[in-house]
Structure formats: structure tokens, C-alpha cells
Image (spheres, grey):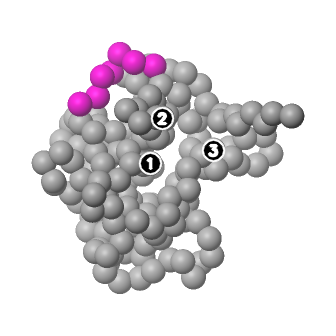
Amino acid sequence: MSVEIRIPGRTIGLDRLKPGACYLTAGTDGPDLALLVVRAGRREALLLNRRSGDGDLTISSGLTTDVDVLELQGAVLVPSGAIDDIAFGPAADAPAALHLGDGSAYLSGRDESGRLATFDVVGGVASAIDPGELPHARRWRVIVPEGGGVVTVYAAEPA
């Protein structure tokens, strides 16, 4: 008996995706799960399943827009585990944490130059908010609606 893993989504051109959309694309070491973000008017990808040596999420700025990707329609980033997993206070020791505040959620990533940027995960827009004092979850996951429930596409664990 074989079990087929099915990830709900649709194939679409990357240039047609709106910021805040999650998608899967071919990466150098297997599929990359990314959040399409905008910083200083430029479309970039915040790689959700890849971390730098310091544990930060990676921002990829050299997007090739004429490729097809699998859009994960309705994808949502949510904390994993119990409410006890949400920490308060400085988040400097929690790279790649999902920060929660003012009705939204934020992720920070580091670009090739080493600059840190914070993005609103719903709209994908770079934010001036300082996530350091927001409550944060080091364990979070990307879920996609499927049938009567949800499918967990990716579960992030602390570095």
C-alpha cells in the first residue's frame, strides 16, 4: 500500500502571486517553501524552510518571475503546540520565531547583505515594527485548508 501526500494548491506564475502568498518552488536542495514579500518596492521571497547559519530565515531577492510555482491557497502561519509555548520579552535569542501582535503576525529574515527585515505574514509587506518586545512562538507551522480540516505543510522547530 502506498500513501500519497497531497498538498492542496494550484500551479501559477510567480509574477501573478500577490504579496503574502505562500508557495512551493524547486530549490537547490529540494522544494522551497516561501512567503512572497515586498520590501522597498521589490518582490522577494522569505524562505520558510531554510535558515542561515545563525538560525535566521533567509530572504531571497533574485526572484525569477517567469517560473511556475505551486501556490498554497489559503495558507496560514500559526503557532504550534500549547499556549505555554508562546514566550514574552526580548526575542533576540529566538531566530525565526513567529511574532504575534496588533492583530497580525510577523516573521523576520536576513538578506544576502546580512540586513534583518520584518514582514507582516498576511500582507507580505516589510514592516517598521520592532518584533523584539512582541510575544513570539518558536514553534509554528504553515497550514492549508483541505476538505473539512487543514493540512500542515511545514512545522518549524527552534534552531
Tag in front: 1 or 3: 1
Magenta-colored span: 62-68
- Give the secondary structure at mark 1: strand
Q: Is residue 67 magenta?
A: yes
Q: Secondary structure at mark 3?
A: strand
Name the amino acid type tagged 1. Asn
Q: Which residue is mark 3?
A: 144
- Say which residue appears at 56% left-offset and 36% top-offset: 72
Residue 27 in the magenta stretch? The answer is no
Find the distance from the CA under tag 1 to the CA under tag 2.
Answer: 9 Å
Q: Which residue is mark 2?
A: 31
Frontmost of labels 2 and 3 is: 2
Tell me whether circle 2 and circle 3 mark residues in contact (CB < 8 Å): no
Marking on residue 127:
none
Q: How many marks?
A: 3
Residue 136 x, y percent position in the rendering: 43, 72
Q: Position of residue 76 (x, y in %)?
A: 55, 50
